[in-house]
Image: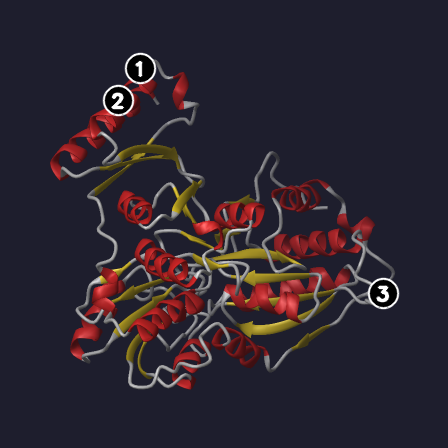
């Protein structure tokens, strides 16, 4: 067995990620990851009547996707697992297909909004939800410490791989089923940016089949242009095109289409907070917002809380990451949650963030109310927000820093319930994030800078 790095974490906040052909995204490591997933699946009991263990694998449009796909398949096959390849498909599509095809797991090969040089591995369980932290740790242990060759089954029990040709069509129908059957998108002109990514075929089909006229952006993937000044991180391109083509709405997806930001007919951004607010208010009015509760993260704007409070909707905040949002939703039975960045989860329809379902949900509100997108966008009045990222030498419990808790309490008292101060470490890099919200832009900027200087001196 090749020597592997010790005391290494493979999994980050959303699966395994790294630069292609560098640890951990090397062919040898990816084979080991596939073998570890396969071995773990072999230890689980299958549902009644099932005799074959299957894994569905999808990917985005990165050049390295071919290598990772084949290495994963080899590792899984060597552990006696059958593999079904579906090609480029959004991350939520794999969550859906895993359940729909009665597979034991689903794997997405994608680095989401990162540049093409990176790639990653996200894993779904048989229920279509991302695997638990405990399962991630067990895969990590197997990859880093086990002699996997000793765990291989006899050659006669190896698995095989085949391609599923109609996966995109299945996902298109599934997404369209989230849109009210009695409505169409006839007469709407939509600017759609698919970031040269996983949704470049399925997303246009969804909107066009529902009757919309689609202006295409970012739909020419070549293996290296995914997220390249396109998609959800660059909504200005969609904004310009909405104005140029006099469109009714703009939709901008990221590379694996699990997140979305939108643009109204005036070219103004509709971020994840506004999407959540628009849909929460409409769902409460229709009696479909379970427990009158919306789940957001600590990064959502304070203006969302204020508007929801006015409407009698409770906002529960979790740590950053759509996985934490979903866990909170599953734990208590909530059906709407998401992030300011555009990961929006409609749990009545999907097990993870789905940019297409989120877009259709907003368009359904627009159609059912007869209100223009710009009017819907004004429902949420954002509170001024300042975010400072500071590089630090070490991460430690902030409450152990003398004077920190008192300083934080004093700042929050000064905001008098009209804002907040929130401080957290990045989950992936040595960075401290300081977020301050409040009605006075100058004052919150000063408070954020004051807190940043204080903490960088002590870290």
Residue placed under numbered mark 3 in the picture:
157
Between 446 and 454, the one lying in front of the other is 446
Query: Closer to the observer: label 1 or label 3?
Result: 1
Between 203 and 196, the one lying in front of the other is 203
Residue farthest to the top? 402
Residue 74's x, y, as percent? 69, 64
Q: Residues within 10 Å of mark 2 (few under 14, many from 20)?
A: some
Left or right of residue 160: residue 268: left
Residue placed under numbered mark 2 in the picture:
454
Residue drawn at x 33%, y 33% as measured from the top left: 422
* 296 vs 408: above or below: below
In the picture, the quarter occupied by the C terminus is top left
* 55 vs 429: above or below: below
**Quadrant hosting residue 47:** bottom right
Query: Closer to the observer: label 2 or label 3?
Result: 2
* Labelled pair 2, 3 in contact (Cβ < 8 Å): no
Q: Residues within 10 Å of mark 1 (few under 14, many from 20)?
A: few
Residue 216's x, y, as percent? 32, 79
Residue drawn at x 31%, y 15% as measured from the top left: 403
* Label 1 or label 2, whichever comes before in sequence order: 1
Residue placed under numbered mark 1 in the picture:
403
Mark 1 → mark 3, Cα distance in angstroms? 62 Å
* Label 1 or label 3, whichever comes before in sequence order: 3
Residue 28's x, y, as percent? 64, 55
* Label 2 or label 3, whichever comes before in sequence order: 3
Left or right of residue 408: residue 81: right
Indicate the secondary structure of the residue bearing disc 2: helix
Residue 3's x, y, as percent? 66, 42
Mark 2 → mark 3, Cα distance in angstroms? 61 Å
* 47 vs 181: above or below: above
**Quadrant hosting residue 49:** bottom right
């Amino acid at each position: 067995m090749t020597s592997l790095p010790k005391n290494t974490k493979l999994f980050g906040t959303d699966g395994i990620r790294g630069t292609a052909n560098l640890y951990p995204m090397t062919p040898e490591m990816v084979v080991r990851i596939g073998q570890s997933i396969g071995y773990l699946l072999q230890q689980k009991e299958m549902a009644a009547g099932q005799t074959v263990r299957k894994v569905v694998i999808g990917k985005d449009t990165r050049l390295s996707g071919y290598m990772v796909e084949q290495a994963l398949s080899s590792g899984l096959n060597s552990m006696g697992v059958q593999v079904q390849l579906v090609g480029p498909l959004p991350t939520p599509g794999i969550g859906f297909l895993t359940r729909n095809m009665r597979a034991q797991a689903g794997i997405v090969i994608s680095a989401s909004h990162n540049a093409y040089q990176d790639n990653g591995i996200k894993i779904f369980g048989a229920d279509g939800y991302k695997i638990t932290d405990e399962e991630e740790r067990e895969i990590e242990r197997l990859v880093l410490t086990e002699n996997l060759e000793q765990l291989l089954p006899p050659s006669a029990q190896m698995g095989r791989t085949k391609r599923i040709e109609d996966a995109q069509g299945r996902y298109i129908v599934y997404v369209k089923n989230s849109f009210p059957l009695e409505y169409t998108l006839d007469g709407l002109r939509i600017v759609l940016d698919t970031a040269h990514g996983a949704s470049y075929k399925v997303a246009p089909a969804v909107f066009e089949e529902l009757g919309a006229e689609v202006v295409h952006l970012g739909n020419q993937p070549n293996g290296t242009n995914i997220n390249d000044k396109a998609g959800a991180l660059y909504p200005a391109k969609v904004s310009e095109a909405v104005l140029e083509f006099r469109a009714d709405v703009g939709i901008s997806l990221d590379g694996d289409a699990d997140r979305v930001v939108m643009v109204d007919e005036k070219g103004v951004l509709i971020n994840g907070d506004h999407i959540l607010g628009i849909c929460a208010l409409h769902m409460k009015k229709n009696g479909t917002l379970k427990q009158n509760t919306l789940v957001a993260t600590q990064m959502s704007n304070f203006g969302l809380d204020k508007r929801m409070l006015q409407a009698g909707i409770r906002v529960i905040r979790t740590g950053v990451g759509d996985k934490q949002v979903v866990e909170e939703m599953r734990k208590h039975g909530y059906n709407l949650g998401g992030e300011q960045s555009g990961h929006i989860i409609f749990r009545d329809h999907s097990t993870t963030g789905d940019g297409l379902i989120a877009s259709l949900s907003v368009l359904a509100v627009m159609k059912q109310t007869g209100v223009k997108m710009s009017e819907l966008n004004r429902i949420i009045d954002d509170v001024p927000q300042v975010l400072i990222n500071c590089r630090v030498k070490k991460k430690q419990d902030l409450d152990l820093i003398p004077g920190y808790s008192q300083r934080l309490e004093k700042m929050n008292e000064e905001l008098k319930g009209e804002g907040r101060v929130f401080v957290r470490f990045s989950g992936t890099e040595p960075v401290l994030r300081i977020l301050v919200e409040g009605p006075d832009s100058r004052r919150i900027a000063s408070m954020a800078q004051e807190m940043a200087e204080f903490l960088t001196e002590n870290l």
